[in-house]
Every structure is written in structure tokens, then in C-alpha cells.
Amino acid sequence: MPKDSGIGASTKRREDVRFLSGTGNYTDDINVHGQAYVHFLRSDVAHGRINGIDTTAAAAMPGVVRIFTGADFEGIGGLPCGWQVTDRHGEPMQEPGHPVLAQGKVRHVGDPIAAVVADTYAQARDAAEAIEVDIEELPAVVDMKAALDEGAAKVHDDLKNNLCYDWGFVEENRDAVDAAIKGAAHVTTLELVNQRMVANPMEPRVAVGDFNRATGDHTLYTTSQNPHVIRLLMGAFVLGIPEHKLRVVAPDVGGGFGTKIFHYAEEAFCTFAAKAVNRPVKWTSSRSEAFMSDAHGRDHVTKIELALDADNNFVALRTDTLANMGAYLSTFAPSVPTWLHGTLMAGNYKTPLIYVNVKAVFTNTVPVDAYRGAGRPEATYQLERVIDKAARELGVDPIALRRQNFITEFPYATPVAVEYDTGDYNATMDKLEEIADIAGFAARRAESEKKGKLRGLGVNCYIEACGIAPSNLVGQLGARAGLYESATVRVNATGGLVVMTGSHSHGQGHETAFPQVIAEMIGIDESMVEIVHGDTANAPMGMGTYGSRSLAVGGSAMVRATEKIINKARKIAAHLMEAAEADIELKDGAFSVAGTDKSVAWGDVCLAAYVPHNYPLEDIEPGLEETAFYDPSNFTYPSGAYACEVEVDPETGKVSIERMIAADDFGNIVNPMIVSGQVHGGLAQGIGQALMEHCIYDDEGQLLSASYMDYAMPRADDVPFYEVDHSSCTPCTHNPLGVKGCGEAGAIGSPPSVVNAVVDALQSAGKNVTHIDMPLSPSRVWAAMQG
Amino acid sequence: MVDVTMTVNGVSKSGAVEGRTLLSAFLRDGLGLTGTHVGCDTSQCGACVVHVNGQAVKSCTMFAVEADGATVDTIEGQAAADGSLNTIQQAFQDHHGLQCGFCTPGMVMSAAALLRDNPKPSEAEIRDYLEGNLCRCTGYHNIVKAIMAASGQDVAAIAAE
């Protein structure tokens, strides 16, 4: 019988009511009295030297308040990078400056050159067209391999070359891996591209800067997944504003998927300009601007080699990857192809020797950073593709090959520096085989063939590292921030609670799910708990929401703070009932004395804390409010097994997803409805990557896919109903809720199964196709079929 | 500037607009009806769908002056006066048909237009109709399910919550 409240209940989302009735409060819905509007003049060339900017005519246009250029930001800090990677020779990565407005050079299409602040948007746009920019176009660096050639044009003149870093992991294993591959009974090699993606949350980015001249207080309203991180980065490293004079508010945010983690130039500009022009300044991105200014995702080119012994046991794995950084280092960009990618290369398998090499490359393209999954989809894709290819080369069943090599004992220390606490990969595979009815596939294939379609089945596993992250560990790995989370639980005098959390909800449903946890702990109704987030003025310093960390880290902080509340309330209850604290039990919203009928209700204890007339003031303080910071001791490791069935039209190459099945182990689950929704969305993004989406630059660095007419977003008729299951459960051992995180799984787990399925379909028709690079568009599939 | 008057959610509203002002901009900035969202600039995403004289329209592709004298219905006018959700809105909540909520106003308005024309659409008909509405969060699963439920169809057999 499913629960109807508390942990494990599919409580309907309370935030839906405002979203469904048009009364949400997104950043673009915020208008500050007297605000001016900014329009950014952006580079239309990929690489060029700015020889002059003439704003004279533009400045005289109607409504123009002021025009800013890079010169206005000389001496002001550039946008900082939050993660320093050390290369395989022990040297720090090359780290270029990233000015708020271009200085000297433009380095990608969309690089902001000037900013026009005017009374209206239309006036700002009109005036921007009147700015004359003299740009000397330079050769664009677009292809990563060419970027590393001796004598290639340099994206940054002050760096040695276009190589950000050459990272080896685990460097000590390098020779042993080479030797194991050389001596292996079988080696499967695959070269593949994990194409550039654009996260595309439906809400474009927005920033509104405000400055109070009387108090010296700055406020920034922004579309962010982590307002405290923006406050720290922008305040301390860009504009020099102390945190107590800077408030950052991220209200309702319309999706993030990673790209709203980062600190962007437009945020710093609006904050800076509001003071400079003494008016609030608002920027709303158009979708076209979003394509050329939001950080992109993925963009890896990889060669992977899997070595097996004569019994088909995995003995070694070697990968070589070129990872595109774009023109500048976005906030967490260096960590994505390294620590969020290399550490996952063991996957679900007991491969004893692994070596990962990543060369990160600067190009004249939009910066690349975390996009849903961030490094883990790239790891999963190459690993699960090469295993499938190996199974075909060896003539063994791909599921059996995976099962044979599964890690089965936990905790398990991988050769790539992480320790999986729990998991049961056979259990999720069993569940997948059951739901997918793998045994019945042959009959379904025969049905498709009758219709003239090729049917394929693809399966894969995945593991990811979520609950990011132990601060002392990531500090050793180069992070310039801690990755704990915070919560303040404030109990009101009549028993209701407000939780101020550093986690940020931009679709995940925290306002509903977090109260389920507290309601369960205290035994009160969920409606007595309110979640407040997204405002540095009232939430304690928190690191925000990404990496499937909110419940595992933010939820744990909330649990710890609530435990402190309960402990104090128990003392008060003991006093009120004149009993020993050790005898006090909390159940169903009341404290009782064990073995007696004495009890006092939750609300009465809370009232006593705030009206402390009969109260042990000599022992405890009045009031009932506690804060906790939770720093996890390890990552969490959700895992699963996915299957995809496709039909391929042999005449056109069009791929249709017939079934998409996900069997996940997320540990304990608070709200199954929300968890399923998270998986659904991830699956659609994974299918989008596998079949449709592709951010394309031409040889001159022109962005060819800069609108929804050119960038193929998955639509309702591109995807089926999904079949998702999360009944497999090995609880996380090191956080108080036993939860692992579910936000990225669908996007990580689905691309390989789609591609595996298409290859299976084509091979069923006798085509010698072993790989097609994503996206598997009709033209690519058709071309592959022609041999 | 041009004066326009239209009946918005049953109430007569007037304002002065430029010739180039889009209906979406007039609703949001002129009338403060910020429930209508703008998610793109190429008429692709559908977050801005409203009804003009009973027809579903992407309000970013229509000038405010074109709606002069028209009847316009937006997401703000869908719930009852006491705030209780209408059938479609309630189905979206019941079936978790939204996450971040940004595409939701357009989805609800498109669904309303669909169900008016086709009271019991099939899954395929719903997916086809929603071709002009992008959602990045839900993978469409629960949106399609919610619309089927709103039309009175039994969705219990459709996998997952």
C-alpha cells in the first residue's frame, strides 16, 4: 500500500498551483521601479582584434543612458574559474583571463563587445546597431585537433598555446595499462564523438541589478541554480563587493540543467552598471543570445580501448579524449572532463587497470561547462559503447558480458580513485530484463520486419557519482570551493516550520519533497513545513543545486538541523512533563513519557520555547531555531540498467524510439512521482542527444545552430511513453536519508542504449555498421547503411 | 504610439503600444500578466500561447495592434475566481505534468484549445498537437498523460507516476 504522506509518498507538488495559474515569480517577472534596460552588442566573428569602438552616434540616440565597453572594466576582475586542474606533469592548467566585456580581442561569436543601457529595450537595441566596431578578423580556431597543431592561431595571445591541460589519470597506471593492452587476448577499439550540446532550459537567462545609494547595498536578481556561489564569485573576484553588501536572489527559475550554475558576464555587468548609472539595470536574454552566451555542454572526441582476457574478463581500459573548453574557462569547466569523467571510467565493472588521458583545448567557440550529467554521460557513453562493440566482436551476449564483469562486492574501491559504497547491478539488470521482456524481443522484431522496418535492441548500464561532494576531497582535486550544503530550520511559536536551504529548486520540487522528510521525522502534517530558498538574504551560505546533490547533501543538512531541533524540543518536553529526558519519545507530533500516558503536543513545546514562563532557562536558551552544515563523507553512486528498442526505416534512415526502459537504483526515495519525472526528463534529453541535438560551428567559427529552427530539440512526437522503475534499492550508507540522487540518471543512461539499439537494428539487416556518431539523424543512419 | 483596447480574461484593458510591440510584450509589460512566458524568438517554443478570439496563438508572433478589439484569454484567467484549478490545470498537478513551470502556461493553453476541438484525443493526436510546445523538463510523458486524463481517459495503465 503506497503511503499518502511523508517519506515514500507521491505527494502532489504544492508549487504547481502558482505555476499552473500564471503566478510564478521568475526573474523576468521582476521589474524594479525606474529600471533601465541593457542590450549587449555581441561579436559576429569568432576571432578578431578590436581596433576601435565608436559609440558617438549611438550615445546620441533616443533613450540611451550610457554605453559601456571593455575600457570601463579595466582594473576590474574578470570572471573567475572555480576549479584548477593540475596536468600530468604536475603543472597547473593554463588559465586565461575572462573579461566582463571584451578587451582587445573577441574570441567567439557572441562575445560581448559593448553594452547599451537605455530607457527601453527597443531603444537599447536600436542604439546598439549604431555602434561602429572596427574588428580585424583573425583566423578562427575551431577544430580541436587543429588547435593543438604547432603554429595554430592562438585563442589567447598570452598563453603558450591552445592546450589548457594534458591530464593523466591514474598517471602511475599508465605503463601498466599499456602493457596489459599489449598482452591482452582481445582489444576492442572505438573512436567516437560526444557532440556539443546546448542545455536549453526553457527560461532564458535574466539579470536585474539594483543599487541603493543610501545604504550601499547591491541586489542582483538572477536565473541561478546557486545564488550564494554567484554572490561569492561576483562579489569577491569580479566586483569587489563584500558579501554583506550584496544580496543575490534566484527566485522561480525555469530549468537549469547545469547551464545556470555558472557566473556569467551579464550578472556582473548589471550589478556594476546599476551603481554606475544609479538606476536598476535589467537584461533578458533572447533565445538567440542564449545559444551564443549560455555555456554549452559535452564536446569530447575520444578513442577508447577495452582489453579482455581469453575468458572475456575486462583486464584494462585506456581512453584518450580531446575536450573542448571553448574560448574561456567557464566556472567549473576544467573539472568536467577530468574529475567528473575520469573517476567514472570503471563504470559498473571490475576492470583492474584504467588510464584516462584528457587534453583540454581552447577554441573560438562558446565556453563549454557542465550539462546534465557533466562528464558522467561522456564516460558512460564511451564505456557502454565499447562494451557493446566488444560483445559483437566476440560473439557473446552483451548482457552476459556485462554481468560477467559486474562489481558484486561492496564497498568497492575502483582503480580510478573512488569507492562505491553500495549497489546491486545484477538486481537492476534483472529488473530491466523483466520489464523490457528481452525474451520477447525476437517476436517484436519479426513484427517490425513485416512492416518493412528494422528493429534493434540496445542495453547499457551506468553508474554516476552524485551528492557532490566531500569538500576536503574536492579541495585536493583542485576545487576552489567547498561543496557542503546548509539548512536553517526555524520553528515558529505555534509549531509550523520554515526551512531555509542552500539548495535551489528550479523544477525539482523541493518545496514539496523536503517537507515530506521533516513531516516524517516529527510526525506532523507536511503543510506545516515551508521551504524558503534562492535568496542569500535569508538562507545560510549554501552551494546550490547541481550534480543530483539536493536531497543527498541539502536534505542531509536539513535532517541534521531538524535533529538538533528535536533534541532541544525533547529537553523542553521533559521539563514540561517533569520527566527524565531519556524517557521522552517523539511520535505522531507529540512527546510522551515512556511507559506513562503523559504527553505534550508538538505545538505546545514550540510555544513554551517562545513563551518561556515555565522553562529551564538556566539550562537551555529560549527559541527553537537551528542551523546545520552537512559535508558528505563520500559521493553517492546511483546506478541502473537501461534498454531501448528502435525501429529504423531502411529507406530513409529515420529512427523511431519504440520503447525506452530505465531500471534505476537511487537508494531510498522520498517522492516516487517526482523521481519518475526526473528520469523522464533525463531520458528525453538523452534521446535528444542520441538522435537530434547538435550544436554546430562551421570552419570560420560561425554558430550554425543558434535557434530552435536549427537546433533540433526533442518534441512530444519524438519520444514515447517511458517505462521507468526504481524499486531496486541499496540505500546510500553514509547520508542520513540513504538517498543517492536521481536528477541526471536519465540523461547519462540513455544515449548508449539508443545507439546500441540502432547498431543492432542495422546489423540485423546484415549491414556491417559498428558505430555511428551522435546525433543519429536520418542522413547519418542512411549514409551508414549505404556502407 | 497607438492606443489598443482588448478584452483580457473578461476585463477590458487598454494601453499605448508601439507598432512593433508584440502581444506577448503588451501582456507582460503593459498589463503585468507575467504568466505568459517568452522562451524563444523564432515562434518555436510555445511558452507564450494564449487564446485570441478563441484560437490558440503564439503571442510572440502577433503584434499587440493586431489584437486591438479582440478577446484574449491567458493562463491567469484559467482558474476559478476562488483560485481553484480548472480540469486541465488540475490534471497537470495530479499527473506531475510540470517541473520548472516555464513552458506550463503555453502547454495548458494549447491543451485547452486541443480539447475544445477534439474532446478525446489519442496519444498520437496529443503528441502531434503539442509539436509547437517545447518542454525541457518532463520528457512530455506526464504532459501527454495529464491531457489524456483531463479528457476523461483512463491513464492508469500508462507506466509510472
Image (cartoon, coloured by chain):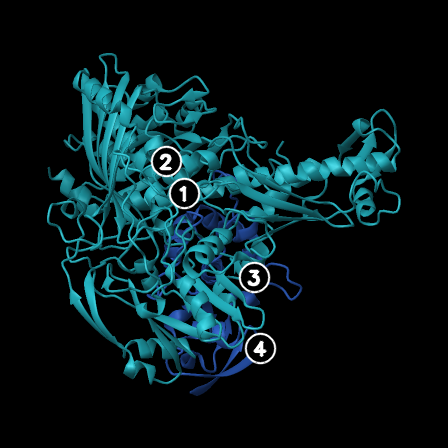
Q: Are marks 2 and 4 on the same chain?
A: no
Tell if the residue under mark 2 belongs to the same chain as the one under mark 3: yes
Q: Position of residue A735 (x, y in %)?
A: 55, 31
Residue holding disc 1: A682
Please name the amino acid that badge 2 sits on: Gly
Tell me whether circle 1 and circle 3 mark residues in contact (CB < 8 Å).
no
Q: Nearer the viewer, mark 1 or mark 4?
A: 1
What is the secondary structure assignment of the residue under circle 2? Answer: helix
Q: Quadrant of residue A517?
A: top right
In three-dimensional space, the C-alpha distance between marks 2 and 4, rounded to whole angstroms, equals: 50 Å
Pointers 3 and 4 within a single chain? no
The N terminus of chain A, quarter of image: top right
In the rendered image, the vertical position of residue A744 relative to residue B103, given as above or below: above
List the residue tagged with mark 2: A749
Q: What label sits on residue B11 in the rendered view? A: 4
Circle 3 sits on which residue? Answer: A21
CB-based contact (under 8 Å), mark 2 and mark 1: yes
Q: Nearer the viewer, residue A473 or A30?
A: A473
Q: Residues within 10 Å of mark 1 (few under 14, many from 20)?
A: many
Identify the chain drawn in blue. B
Q: Residues within 10 Å of mark 4 (few under 14, many from 20)?
A: few
